[in-house]
Image (cartoon, rainbow, N blue to C red):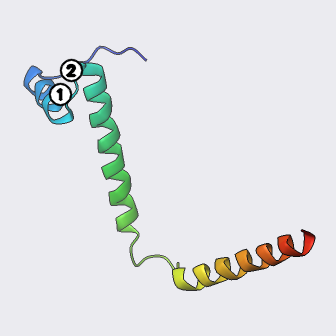
Amino acid sequence: MRATLNIPDELIKEVQKVSGEKSKTKAVTIAMKEYLKQQKLKQILCLRGKTGFAFDWQEEEKKEIEAQAGRERAIGKRG
């Protein structure tokens, strides 16, 4: 999408310098993506302690290992 924006020259130069991009378009795109990522992370962090989500990764890993062993046994019986 093409857009006409009034962005201060110094701000664009700083974004280009920090991002390492020579293209203004690429530098602004990187900056916008990073901004969105940070905002989404803030939203997720605001939910901390507000949900009833409990994930036991060790239990899930155990289930996956058992399932994989079962798949391997099934393949072994066919071969």
Please tell me in which quadrant of the rendered image residue 31 appears.
top left
- Amino acid beneath label 1: Gln
Residue 43 sits in which quadrant? bottom left
- Would residue 27 be seen by someone viewing this image from the given angle? yes
**Disc 1 marks which residue?**
16
Q: Using residue 60 as the reference point, say whether residue 25 is left or right of it.
A: left
Q: Which mark is residue 59?
A: none
In the rendered structure, which disc, 1 or 2, sits on the residue that comes first in sequence? 1
**Element assignment for label 2:** loop
Residue 22 is marked as 2
Quarter of the figure that contains the C terminus: bottom right
Q: Residue at x 16, y 25 (%)?
A: 12
Measured as percent of width and height from the top left, residue 57 is found at 53, 80
Q: Are marks 1 and 2 in contact (CB under 8 Å)?
A: yes
Q: Residue at x 38, y 73 (%)?
A: 48
From where the camera sits, is residue 55 visible? Answer: no
How many C-alpha atoms fall within 10 Å of the one at disc 1: few (<14), some, or many (≥20)? many
Q: Is residue 59 above or below residue 47?
A: below
Residue lying at the far right of the rendered structure: 78
State whether residue 57 is above or below residue 75: below
Label 1 and label 2: CA atoms lie apart by: 6 Å
> Residue 52: x and y, percent?
52, 80
> Residue drawn 17% across and 27% down?
16
Asked if residue 43 is positioned above or below residue 15 in the image, the reply reads below
Q: Is residue 16 left or right of residue 42?
A: left
The amino acid pointed to by label 2 is Lys
Q: Residues within 10 Å of mark 2 (few under 14, many from 20)?
A: few
